[in-house]
Image (cartoon, rainbow, N blue to C red):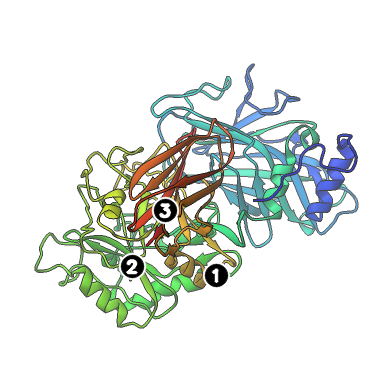
């Protein structure tokens, strides 16, 4: 976790002057910095500021435009003139905001950002800092002001922003190649909204004349310059549980999800803002004659260093429970939970057992792992009594179905849960597994699934995110992501990119250590960098909370706790809960 810049990070004790801030940013980015809002042009369906504004800067004008995600007409504006001499790239400095527009969760969609009529990048509403990248361009948004209401409650933030579940504001840097602009002339930036259904979410543009030196622009520069790190590992975030609308390679709209398979991959790579991804269509959605074509899509979209993809599918047994299957490379297979083919069936005789699934997967010779999910859901429970640590390397603790950590955890997600069959129950049975989260998204928006009226499971939306998995690895490739997941060197978040380092006696999450010696304590060390203020951190031993530390709203928290326990195997994991209820769960460390 890196040291951050501030207004006095330069030489001497004087604050950097505006010209010095600009020079520093340009040197860090090797890009010419241009104020991104000069003169508003077409406002389209954007709403203009009222007497009470919502921006986050002290020096702020009443020039504020809010573009709804359901807007039919986008907005366009001119930047300040580009310098006559430019560097390799041009970085447009903007003041942006994102919000939900309703106390109820809303469908996701995307905003397409064009520079001089060329699509630069696509983004989405976020409640945290985020970077979106394409082959040529990058948009880095630093969430420097964050607001969140309690579930079913709302905020009033301005004359325009009312009944708000969450909103966030901050500086952004839109970096494009210099040959996209004309030296000496302003560029034209245009934003178009895209959403398949009605949504109240929004993007806001406002004007802060002294944006570079009267906001924390350093946060946006940090996002462009480095990745979060834990020890010698970099931290990457992905969604490895989503469904398309395709069935048998030919029918779109008949699956339990939305969009084609390619559209789901492209959203994950683009506005989804993911580092790694897996499409896990149900086995009955895949034509048995075209299995390799389906699995090979992951190889086609793989971009080492930028976007890693795991070949995967979902084994959808209503008798034994749902498991996702992930392969390390090509050559895998798809196994139907229904012996007779087609969708799942409530029939023991016709249902493939987990043992038969593992046998069929072993026969491919391709390294694989299986991941049970939403185990305590009464509609799709998973029999955690059938558990093979060799293959069941992880459990999905959170998704659009809610939290599976323990009964009563927030947000529940679905209406009815068994009071057992959850993560803490599985730990009590002696099972060893890592923890991840992913969306189980059905709305065509990997990384930010929030349901909607067109989705089969229309109840699947949340006041938190839809779930992301985090891995600790030294490079971003399919193999390295798989290996980190398989080694349980990973953790779960509700959706925000919380950075969580949890260790026991110096060993990283997922480790298995010998039993403690006589009078030797278990030393639990936690270092967390939140995306919002941290409410509290829990240390969980053997599936039960044994220590809680308040966070007092700090964004960064470090703690050490010593535990002396009797002989016998023990496990420790950490849960971080922010003031906005977004959370992260570490994979356990086992002793003995």
Give the residue drawn at x 84%, y 52%: 27
- Distance, label 2 to label 1, CA atoms, is 30 Å
Q: Viewer-proximal residue, 562 or 479?
A: 562
Q: Quadrant of residue 545?
A: top left
Position of residue 172 relative to residue 367, above or below, is above
Q: Alpha-carbon neighbours of circle 1 within 10 Å: few (<14), some, or many (≥20)?
A: many
Q: How far across and down, in percent of the image, does residue 572 sit?
A: 41, 52
Contact between labelled residues 1 and 2, with CB atoms less than 8 Å apart: no
Read off the residue under disc 1. 477
Position of residue 336 relative to residue 44, above or below, is below
Q: Quadrant of residue 5?
A: top right
Q: Alpha-carbon neighbours of circle 2 within 10 Å: few (<14), some, or many (≥20)?
A: few
Q: Viewer-proximal residue, 34 or 423?
A: 423
Q: Residue furthest front?
A: 518
Q: Secondary structure at mark 3?
A: loop
Q: Secondary structure at mark 1?
A: loop
Is residue 558 something one can see in this rendering?
Answer: yes
Contact between labelled residues 2 and 3, with CB atoms less than 8 Å apart: no
Read off the residue under disc 3. 444
């Amino acid at each position: 976790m890196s040291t951050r810049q501030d207004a006095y990070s330069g030489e001497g004790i004087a604050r950097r002057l505006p010209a010095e801030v600009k020079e520093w940013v340009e040197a860090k980015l090797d890009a010419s910095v241009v104020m991104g809002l000069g003169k508003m042009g077409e406002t389209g369906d954007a709403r203009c500021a009222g007497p009470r504004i919502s921006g986050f800067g002290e020096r702020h004008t009443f020039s504020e435009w809010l573009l709804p995600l359901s807007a039919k007409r986008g907005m366009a504006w001119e930047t300040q003139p580009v310098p006559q001499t430019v560097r390799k790239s041009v970085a447009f400095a903007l003041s942006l905001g994102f919000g939900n527009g309703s106390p109820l969760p809303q469908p996701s969609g995307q905003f397409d950002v064009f520079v001089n009529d060329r699509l630069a990048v696509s983004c989405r509403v976020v409640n945290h800092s985020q970077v979106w990248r394409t082959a040529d361009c990058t948009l880095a948004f630093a969430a420097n002001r964050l607001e969140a209401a309690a579930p079913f409650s709302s905020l009033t933030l301005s004359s325009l922003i009312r009944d708000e579940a969450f909103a966030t504001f901050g500086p952004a840097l839109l970096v494009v190649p210099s040959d996209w602009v004309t030296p000496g002339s302003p560029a034209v930036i245009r934003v178009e909204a895209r959403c398949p259904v009605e949504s109240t979410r929004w993007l806001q543009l406002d004007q802060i004349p002294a944006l570079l030196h009267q906001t924390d622009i350093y946060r946006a520069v940090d996002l462009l310059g480095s990745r979060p790190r834990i020890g010698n590992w970099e931290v990457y975030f992905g969604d490895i549980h989503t469904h398309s609308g395709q069935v048998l390679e030919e029918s779109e709209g008949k699956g339990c999800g939305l969009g084609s398979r390619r559209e789901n991959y492209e959203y994950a790579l683009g506005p989804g803002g993911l580092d790694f991804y897996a499409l896990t269509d149900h086995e009955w959605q895949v034509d048995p004659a075209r299995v390799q074509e389906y699995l090979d899509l992951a190889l086609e979209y793989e971009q080492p260093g930028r976007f890693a993809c795991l070949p995967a599918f979902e084994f959808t047994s209503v008798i034994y429970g749902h498991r996702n299957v992930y392969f390390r490379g090509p050559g895998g297979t798809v196994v139907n939970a229904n012996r007779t083919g087609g969708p799942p069936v409530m029939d023991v005789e016709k249902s493939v057992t987990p043992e038969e699934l593992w046998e069929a997967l072993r026969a491919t010779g391709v390294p694989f792992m299986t991941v049970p999910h939403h185990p305590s859901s009464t509609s799709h429970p998973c029999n955690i009594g059938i558990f093979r640590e060799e293959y069941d390397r992880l459990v999905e603790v959170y998704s659009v179905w809610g939290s599976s950590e323990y009964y009563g955890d927030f947000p529940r997600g679905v209406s009815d849960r068994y009071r057992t069959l959850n993560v803490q129950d599985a730990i009590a049975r002696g099972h060893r597994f890592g923890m991840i989260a992913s969306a189980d998204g059905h709305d065509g928006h990997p990384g930010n699934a929030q349901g909607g009226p067109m989705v089969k499971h229309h109840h699947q939306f949340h006041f938190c995110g839809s779930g992301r998995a985090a891995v600790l690895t030294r490079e971003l490739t399919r193999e390295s992501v798989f290996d980190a997941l398989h080694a349980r060197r990973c953790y779960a978040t509700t959706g925000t990119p919380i950075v969580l380092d949890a260790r026991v006696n110096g060993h990283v999450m997922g480790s298995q250590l010998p039993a403690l010696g006589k009078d030797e304590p278990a030393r639990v060390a936690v270092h967390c960098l939140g995306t919002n203020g941290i409410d509290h951190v829990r240390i969980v031993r053997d599936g039960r909370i044994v220590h809680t530390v308040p966070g007092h709203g700090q964004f960064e928290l470090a703690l050490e706790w010593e535990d002396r326990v009797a002989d016998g195997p023990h496990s420790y994991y950490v849960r971080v809960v922010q003031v906005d209820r977004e959370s992260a769960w570490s994979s356990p460390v086992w002793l003995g």
